[in-house]
Image (cartoon, rainbow, N blue to C red):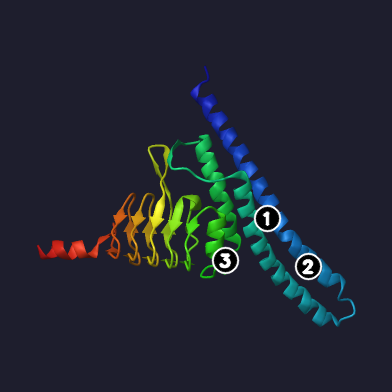
Amino acid sequence: MLTAKVKALLVTITQLLFVAWLHLVAILAMGSAIFPGILLIYYVWTHTFVYFIIFRVWLFCVSLVLAYFVYGFSLIFILGLLRIVLRLNLKEGEYQIASIGMMRWMFINALYTIVSITFMDFILLTPIAPLFFSLMGAKVGKNVQINSKICADLSLLEIGDNTVIGGHATVICHSFERNRLILRKIKIGKNVVIGLNSVVLAGAEIGDGAFITAGAVLGRNKQVEPHSVYAGVPAESTKERRERDKA
């Protein structure tokens, strides 16, 4: 029988090895993404000897910036391809801490985090953001506007046509309770507005045409009626609040 200390040590070693593996994947993915940009920089520097030094340095600086954008777009497609090939989709359920299911969740979100930290600010409010969400497993409708990178568990996220996710809104399909990771889908209907700095938690379902106001916190498993307005912390229907205040 293993003692509690030995078990704790084994868990720690397993976690360290897993983190090391995550870092290795990140190194390989980011290195592969930046490779075309480095080739571009090398080409510019080695083929501009005949130019004046000031112009040559300017071209080099431009190629550096261009290489960064080549890196960003390459990274998006590399990670999307990796998710598709490895079938890295999350499933609703409950998982113990340090379980295989939790490690899978960590790995999938780590892929998203790489882009979120290093490049995503440049693709918000562009068609590239919904494309990236789709590549990471989200179901995204037409003409969706995404202005927040504080999202997670994208393969459990559904976003309908013409929906807007406002600046710095938080949309996460997981929660932690009593040493368990709980994953639940979030379904956002068509023509929905998720306001600035609002929070949408796991299991929420938002009907078509609904409006989650700025700063509202929509709790777990909350059902939002179509064409309603939800505000406050915790978020509740403004119509129901007015009726309650009149009573």
Q: Is residue 32 left or right of residue 1?
A: right
- Which residue type carries mark 2? Leu
Residue 200, by quadrant, is bottom left
Figure check: 183 above or below 99:
below
Please tell me which of labels 1 and 2 falls first in the chain.
1
Closer to the observer: label 3 or label 1?
3
Q: Is residue 190 left or right of residue 234?
A: right
Q: Position of residue 91 (x, y in %)?
A: 47, 43
The CA span between labels 1 and 2 is 16 Å
Picture residue at 37% right of the left edge, 65% below the top: 192
Figure check: 16 above or below 200:
above
| CB contact under 8 Å: marks 3 and 1 | no
Q: Position of residue 227 (x, y in %)?
A: 29, 65
Picture residue at 32% right of the left edge, 64% below the top: 210
Q: Is residue 194 left or right of residue 30?
A: left
Give the numbered dot on residue 128: 3
| CB contact under 8 Å: marks 3 and 2 | no
Q: Is residue 232 left or right of residue 145?
A: left
Circle 1 is placed at which residue position?
A: 30
Closer to the observer: label 3 or label 2?
3
- Which residue type carries mark 1? Met
- Which residue type carries mark 3? Ile
Q: Residues within 10 Å of mark 1 (few under 14, many from 20)?
A: many
Please tell me which of labels 3 and 2 falls first in the chain.
2
